[in-house]
Amino acid sequence: MEAARSAMAEGGIEAVAVEPLARRLGVTKGSFYWHFEDRKALLNATLERWEKESTEARISASRRIFDPRERLVRLGEEVFGDAPLDGEASGQGIFSRHAFELAVSDAAEDPLVRPVLRRVIEHRVGYLEECYRELGFSLEEARHRALLVYAAHAGTLRLFRDAPHLVPRGEGYTYYRRHLLSTLVPGDRAGDAEGT
Amino acid sequence: MEAARSAMAEGGIEAVAVEPLARRLGVTKGSFYWHFEDRKALLNATLERWEKESTEARISASRRIFDPRERLVRLGEEVFGDAPLDGEASGQGIFSRHAFELAVSDAAEDPLVRPVLRRVIEHRVGYLEECYRELGFSLEEARHRALLVYAAHAGTLRLFRDAPHLVPRGEGYTYYRRHLLSTLVPGDRAGDAEGT
DNA sequence: TTTTTACCATACGCTGGCGTATTGACAAAG
DNA sequence: CTTTGTCAATACGCCAGCGTATGGTAAAAA
């Protein structure tokens, strides 16, 4: 079932439950248990799909662009892009993706979620680290920068949800994003310390 | 009841439930409903207490130190301090505080939690913003920096929990923290752009 | 000593979700 | 036409948590 995805995005992990979902689809749970073994099975399917999409998307991005700095900027614009939770654009696209992300992250303590989330974070931090390595940073420095970038991303997402009134809107947000990128990605005018 | 606090820290918001808590205390829920009106009442009490402590702690810190840069560094060392989730030191102190924080943040969608969390974030970002203003940054720049710092904090906490193996340990962590502070707090050698 | 107050236990009903038969409809294959 | 396989509905039992009612006990107050 595809509706589990949106349920997760809207109501968190506890919303991806069999009876509510069945109601939502106008069927009864009797039929549900034909498609899935368990609630666990449904959850796992949803999560694994998310993992797949997350990693694949990032990989395709890295194939197309060669300059690592450009990759970072692109990634930043995509992930911090255009007021994540406003969700006006396309009604479901970027909005739902971030909401899903938040739901997963909120359920990090769940035994089914933990390993998936762990792998996705590994993948992302690994990717970031690689970019910084290509920019000539030491292994340690690259790791540090990758972690900080990821943390800033995760935190910003939450900020949007939990205290949206603090985050600048409209063109103010564009400036904010520029600030983020300029402090996190060396090249615009900051950083460029250390490595070659 | 004081035990709700630790339950929240350990098992998240769903663990602060009346029957499990009563069992844990060796009493029955019959007695519980003498002390509290509701489950909501218990939750509210726990959250309001957390809010109070959070804000008071930060205020007292600002009274003691005059140099805003020093305040930021101190705050950073306290909040990013000494491998947050290792929790060996003092068994319950810093560990439990951060675990509670994560639990609240995970339950941000809860109608009871949302306003409290919102206020706490407001307070913290406001405090950070003030520090940066005192350092001479423009209102906009100060806000941007405050948001980034808070986001980095929230994200780092989650990284510790969700992918602890990626975060350097021991003295490696000290270097990481130094990296954080040097990129986020101007003065060591970075930043110092814009505002007079 | 009676009586009130503070605290706790027992027991009940309610809700909502999970999982399991069991049965039915309906279409494709035999 | 019958058989088989796919998908759905009904109905049941189970569990866990919430909230309520009621009764008990022991100490303090009267």
Image (cartoon, coloured by chain):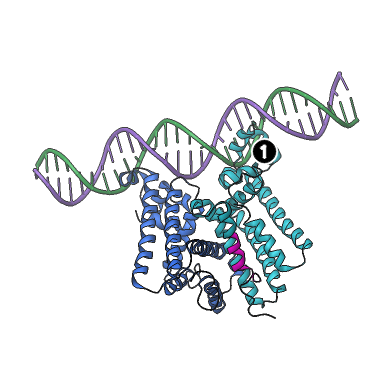
Chain colours: A cyan, B blue, C green, D purple
Residue D1 rendering spot, x and y as whole percentages: 86, 18
Q: Identify which residue is drawn at 65% across, 60% down.
A: A76
Q: Position of residue B16 (x, y in %)?
A: 43, 51
Residue bearing mark 1: A33
The answer to whether any part of residue A81 appears in the image is yes
Q: Is residue B46 above or below residue B40?
A: below
Q: Secondary structure at mark 1?
A: helix
Residue at (77, 66) in percent of width and height: A66
Q: Is residue A178 magenta?
A: yes
- In the image, taking residue B144 as reference, residue A53 lies left or right, namely right
Q: How many marks?
A: 1
Residue B44 appears at what percent x and percent y? 38, 49
Chain at tag 1: A
Q: Is residue B161 left or right of residue B113?
A: right
Comparing B28 with B94, the one in front is B94
In the image, residue A27 lies at what x, y percent? 65, 31
Callout 1: 10 Å neighbours few (<14), some, many (20+)? few
**Which secondary structure dominates the residues rendered in magenta?**
helix
Q: Nearer the viewer, residue A102 or B136?
A: B136
Residue B107 in view of the camera = no
- Asked whether B124 or A115 is in front, the reply is B124
Relative to A188, does residue A18 appear above or below in the rendering? above
Residue beneath the point at 58% across and 54% down: A171
Using the image as rendered, state which of residue A26 and residue A74 is in the foreground.
Answer: A74
Side of A162 where A79 appears, left or right: right
Is residue B122 covered in magenta? no
In the image, residue A91 above or below residue B53: above
- Residue B13 located left or right of residue A43: left
Residue bounds of the magenta highlight: A176-189
**Type of amino acid under label 1:** Tyr
Name above or below for residue A28 compared with residue B87.
Answer: above
